[in-house]
Amino acid sequence: MLLVPLAFALQPPSVTPEEQPAEPHPPWEAEPPPVDPEVIEGRRRPDYTDPLPDPVTQDNPGAVRAPPPQAFPTDEVPIPDRWRLIETLGLVKERFWDPYNQNTYKGDRPINPEKVPWLPITGNDWFLVLNGISDTVLEPRSFPIPVGVQTTEDTDRIDVFGDDFSTVFSQTFIVGAALLKGSTAYKPPDVEYRVTLAFNMNYVDVPERRVLFVEPSKPSHRFDHFLGVQEAFFDYHFRNTSDRYDFDSARIGIQPFQSDFRGFLFNDQQLGLRFFGTRDNNRFQYNLGAFWRLEKDTNSGLNSVVQRPRDDFVFVANAYRQDFLIPALTSQITLVYNRNREADEIEIDDNGFPVRPALLGDLRGRDYDVFYLGYNADGRIGRINVTASAYGALGEDRNSFFTSEPADIRAFFAAAELSYDKDWMRFRLSGAYASGDDDPFDNTEGGFDAIFENPVFAGADTSYWIRQTIPFAGGGRAVSVNGRNGLLNSLRSSKEQGQSNFNNPGLVLVGAGADFDLTPEFRIFANANHLWFENTATLEALRNEGSIPKNIGWDLSTAAIWRPKATQNIVFRLSAAALLAEDGFRDLFDSLDGGGAYYSILVNAILTY
């Protein structure tokens, strides 16, 4: 039976649907606009479907139908694994020297256990990561250089300080290997073995003797080399605590650790045991660690595993919370305990200079216990980027080198950097305060000192004051006002081999800077800092002077960074910095030529595989 639509059945037989007149619209209703399927280029109007094309029919008599699924083996299907599928299709050809495309040696594909039977691995979820870095540094610089007491390179030099120019060349090769178990796209590895070695060659030329070697008979230039073990640890993933891969893990061995966002207190690669993990979709993170500090090579600063570790222990507990206090701000609370028992030790560095105890005061060894309680923040407040740190140091020095008596440690530190982004520009304001000791002969030490600082702050190692070491003559030739790659005026023999010193003048810093990303490959930045001693009582006692001004001077620096491939695999940097000395610095380091300005040039090339 033929069924006719009701709408058609109600029309007179002589009128076809196409001939039926359209029902007129009321005068108050406008004619609807025609449908435009592409209102915006590349997008279609919602709920609109293009007319379907004409149906396609195929007449292929005699064609053979595809075999049924039962015809294929079910135990093994001969297709390449998903990691190497694109290579099988001819889209990518792996080359072991190419770090930019998929590479088995960069952890992009799992290891085939059959090809490495000597490795203790089973399964197809083990990955190998090889790293190689070449770090080249050429650094002409000037700083106050003491004249040798026994002899000098120039008989005209009878002042305390002579010529101030010196040159440093340093070449470091870093090679590392990591063996990982587990796919790490969304979760940490189940197991990780990692080893990293660093080989450094350095050459230094200075205009005076007894600067590089304690013996005055040795020349005023030096070539040295050293192989250090920077990483050697085992990492074990205990468990996942949520379906978002929050986890608990442990790591034992020589490992990197940074106690805060900018490396103000403890940023080093030391022997230790650490428990760490996350909760609440990674919004909460924690660390519990204990570190046994290794001796460092004097001239390269690398770890020396052929010497007995120091009697110096660091215990750390910290917790991070994202969006704490305000959204977009990560807050961190840190508790660090530094236990030092090196009072009965005498340590001489590789150049013959005593480093423990430092050549200050009564020259006796020291034991100390210091607790650091800190709050750190990193993130944004509206359009303003914020990084801030505050620490209090509380404890006891068993032997103050001024009084030879125990002294309480009460010192404080605070630093903050605010920045504002405008298109391809970033403008920064920086400030730091480290308390100084106001009376070196009382029973309280009020100068703040860190354990091992490596700050990324106020121009970082482009800054003259952070980059250069200023020797403190008069209070000990092997003692410096500040340390290389350090911010604090701690009066230590070195941050690598010396002890923390809480009898120091402290620091006040105020600075401004700007970064300009001219292209994705090229950045320039500039920074200007003004520095003061927070309190000069310690300096006055060590130099036997009635008064020393607090002004250190202006630290001006600028740098250019070029990344030819817009990655971190090839980075070239050229920077220049100058210290325009003011009254306090000139009072301490008045040299033969007046000592009004000092400079440093840094040429750096980093190649990474």
Image: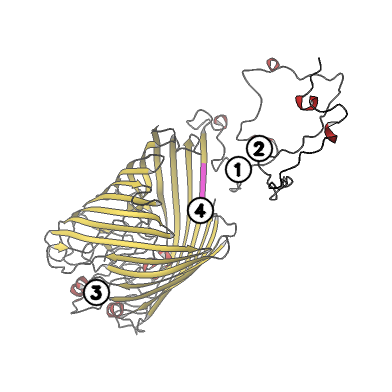
Can you give x and y, in whole percent of width and height, for residue 138 in the image? Answer: 48, 67
Q: Is residue 162 above or below residue 173?
A: below
Can you give x and y, in whole percent of width and height, for residue 238 in the image? Answer: 38, 33
Instruction: Judge depth for marks 4 and 2 and give the one in front.
Output: 2
- Whichever of labels 2 and 3 marks the residue nearer the N terminus, that label is 2
Does the residue at mark 2 contact the one at mark 3 (Cβ under 8 Å)? no
Instruction: Judge depth for marks 4 and 1 and give the one in front.
Output: 1
* Closer to the camera in the image, 139 or 348: 139
Magenta segment, prevailing SS (helix, strand or loop): strand
Tag shown at residue 102: 1
Residue located 68% across and 15% down the image: 70
- Residue 317 visible in the displayed image: yes
Residue located 58% across and 63% down the image: 519
Q: Secondary structure at mark 1?
A: loop
Q: Amino acid at mark 1?
A: Gln
Instruction: Judge depth for marks 3 and 4 and give the one in front.
Output: 4
Q: CA distance from mark 2 to mark 3?
A: 68 Å
**Residue for badge 4:** 133
What's the magenta region? 129-133
Query: Picture quarter containing residue 210?
Result: bottom left
Can you give x and y, in whole percent of width and height, for residue 315 in the image? Answer: 27, 47
- Whichever of labels 3 and 4 marks the residue nearer the N terminus, that label is 4
**Residue for badge 3:** 474
Query: Picture quarter containing residue 452?
Result: bottom left
Q: Is residue 419 one of those drawn in magenta?
A: no
Local crowd size for mark 3, using a 10 Å CA cut-off: few (<14), some (14–19), many (≥20): some
Does the residue at mark 3 contact the one at mark 4 (Cβ under 8 Å)? no
